[in-house]
Image (cartoon, coloured by chain):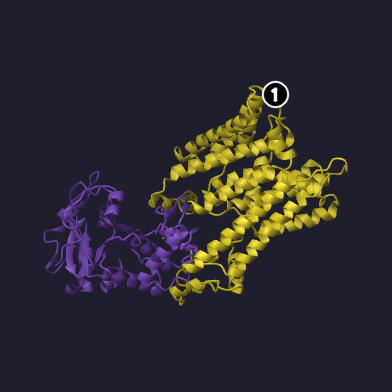
Amino acid sequence: MTVNSPDTTPPPAGSRVANSDFSGDNQQAATLGDAVRSYANRVRGGDMGSLPAIFGLLVLFIIFSLANDKFLSTLNLANLITQSGSICVLAMGLVFVLLIGEIDLSAGVAGGVSAAIVGLAMTDHGQPWWVAALAGIAAGAVIGVAIGLLVANLGIPSFVVTLAFFLALQGVNLKLIGQGGSIGIDDDVIRGLTIKNVPVTAGWIAAVVLVIAFAALSYNRHRVQVAKGLAHDPLVLVVIKIVVFAAIILGVTALLNTNRSLNPVFPIHGIPWVLPVVAVLLLFWTFVLTRTSYGRHLYAVGGNAEAARRAGINVGMMKISAFVICSSMAAISGILSASYSGKVSPGSGGGNVLLYAVGAAVIGGVSLFGGRGRAVDAVIGGVVIATVANGLGLLNQASYINFLVTGGVLLVAASVDAISRRRRSASGV
Amino acid sequence: MTQPLLELRGVNKSFGVVHVLHDVDFAVYPGQVTALVGDNGAGKSTLVKIIAGIYGRDSGDYLFDGEPVAAHNPKDVADLGVEVVYQDLALCDNLDIVENMFLGREAKKGLALDEVTMESRARETLASLSVRTVKSVRQSVASLSGGQRQTVAIAKAVLWNSKIVLLDEPTAALGVAQTRQVLDLVRRLADRGLGVVLISHNMGDVFEVADRITALYLGRVAADVPTKDVTHQQVVELITAGRSGSLGIAENPETAAV
C-alpha cells in the first residue's frame, strides 16, 4: 500500500470529509468566503502554485525600482518583456519534461544548435525565414526523439542522457559555426520578432478580443457547470478572475503602446512581436495540458507511472513525446534568443541559459518531482528570472554577482518546491 | 444454484519447475461475494493474475457465462467486464477523483476532454454505490483517506459496467471505520448483481460479507463451501492444514507439496 496518511488519524481540519453527504458537494465553495478558505487551506498544505513567484516578482520590482530609477521606465519594462521571451518559451518546454519527473539539461544548447541551423539555412543556403525556422524546430524535434528513445527504451536516467547531449551538442554547434565565428541574424521577420512591434491599433484589438474571449469562455463554463450541477467556483470568483485577467492584459498593452523612445524624433510604441509568440504558445500548451487526454496522461505518468501503465497509457511514448516537445520548444527559444542578440555564436544556449529556464519553471510552481505544474507557471517564473537578469544588469554588477544571485534563486525555488512537497504529503492536500 | 458468471476448470500453472496451481476449479456467481483465502504462497495472487489475464494458463478452461472464452491478456479480460482492484490501488495522487476514474478512457468531445460527461458519470456511479464520504468529486486523490481511496478504486472498476470485480486485500491497510465502509461497499456491489471476489487474510471480513469461501492450500483448492456451512475454526484449519474434518484435501498433503 502506498497510503501516505495513517488511517487512524482524523482528517485535517481543512477537509471535513467524514460526515458530509456526497450529494452536498455542489455547494462546495458556493460563496467567495468558502473559496478563499479552501484556497488558504491548499496554500497552507503546501500547494502554493505560482504564489511564491508572484510574491518574489513584487519584491524584485520594489528592490530594483528603489535601486535604479531607470528600472520602471517604459523602455526598460518593454525590454524586460522582450528579454523574458526566450526564457519563458524554454521553461514552457521544460514543463513537459519536469511533469513526467525527468529533466532535460541539454535544452539550452539544443536551442543553440537549432538557432545555428536556422542561421545557416538563411545565410549559406538562402532559404526564406519560415523554411529556416521549420528546419530549426525539426532539428530540435530530432534531438528530442533521440533523448526520449535513450531514456524510455534503454532506461538511462534522463540526467545522464541529457548531460551527454549538453556536452555533445556544444561540439555540434562549434562545428556548425566554426571556432570564433558567429552567424548574423538579419532577416526582417526573425530579427523583427524582438526589435519590431505590433502596430498600436492591432495590439489593442488583439488585447480586447483576448479579454472578451476569456470572459465568454469562463462565464460559459460556469453556466454549464451550474446547469449540470457540477462542482464549480462561485460566480464572484469567476468575475474576479476575469477582471484580473483583463487588468493584466490591458495594462501591459497600454504600457507597451505608449511611446517609450528616449529620442522624441523616433517614437517607439507597440507590443514587441515576441509577446504574441509567447502568448500563442502559452494558450496552445495550456489547452493541450488541461483539455486533452494527452495532457491528462502526462500528469498521470508524472503522478504514478505504474497507475498510468495499468490504465493502458503507453508510458514510453509519453516520455518520448515530452522530450520532443521540450527540444522543439527549445528550438523556438533559441530562435528568439538569436533574434534578440542578432547573432548565433558557438556558445549560444550554453552557460546559464538552461539553469535560468529550469529556475523559471520551478519558481513558477512546476515541481521537480513530477506531476505538478502548468504552462503559465513557466511564463510567470520566466518573468521573475528575466527581472533578476535585467535588474542586475541595470545595477552594473560584476558578473560574478549575477551567477551567485541566479544560483541562489534556483536553490531557493527548489527548496520551496521540496518543502511544499513535504507539507503536501503531511497534510494530504 | 445459478450458473457461475465466471468459472475456471482444472487450471494448472507452473513457473519453471515450481508447480503453483494444481487442477484449480474456481467459480464466481452473480450477486455473490466469493472469498478467496489461503496462506502466503498458496497461489491466491497467481490465480488472480490468471483471471485478470496477466498470466497465461498451462492447462484448464476459462468460462464466462458458461461459454469457454479465449482470455489470454488483460484486454480480453477487461472486454469481458472483469476488473481487478489491486492492493496498491493504482491511483494518481496528483489527479482528482473524476480524472482518476476515467484515466486512460477519457470521454472526449472532438479533440478536447468532455469534463461535463465525465464528472456527471463519476457522480452517478459514486451515488449509486451510496458513497457518502467523499466531499467533492473534484478533490485530489492525495487528500483522501485510505478507505476513500479504496472506494474510488472500486468505483473506477464499477464505472465501466463491469460484471465481476476482484478485490485484492481491500482492507489490509485500513482502520476500523474505513474497513466498515469498504465492506459495506463490497456488499452493495454484490447486491447490484455483480460477481465479487474478495481476497483477504482477515477472517472477520470474510465471514461478514462472503457468501462462499474458496480456500487454497499449496496450490490446490482445499474447499469451496457456502460461508454459512463452515465455522471460523474450520476455515483456519483449511488454510493452514488443507483439511478440516470431512472437508478439505483427502489424500496426504505431502504429495501436493512442491
Where the C terminus of chain A falls, by quadrant?
A: bottom right
Q: Tell me the chain of label 1.
A: A
Q: Which chain is purple?
A: B
Query: Is residue A62 positioned above or below B144 on the image?
Result: above
- Left or right: where does residue B195 sit relative to residue A392? left
Residue kind at label 1, given as amino acid type: Gln
- Nearer the observer, A87 or A404: A87
Q: Which chain is yellow?
A: A
Query: Is residue B204 positioned above or below A410 on the image?
Result: below
- Nearer the observer, A237 or B138: A237
- Nearer the observer, A191 or A422: A191
Where the N terminus of chain A falls, by quadrant?
A: bottom left
Label tally: 1
Query: Is residue A300 positioned above or below B222 on the image?
Result: above
Asked if residue A408 can be seen in this view, the reply is no
- Residue at the outermost bottom position: A19
Q: Which residue is mark 1?
A: A179
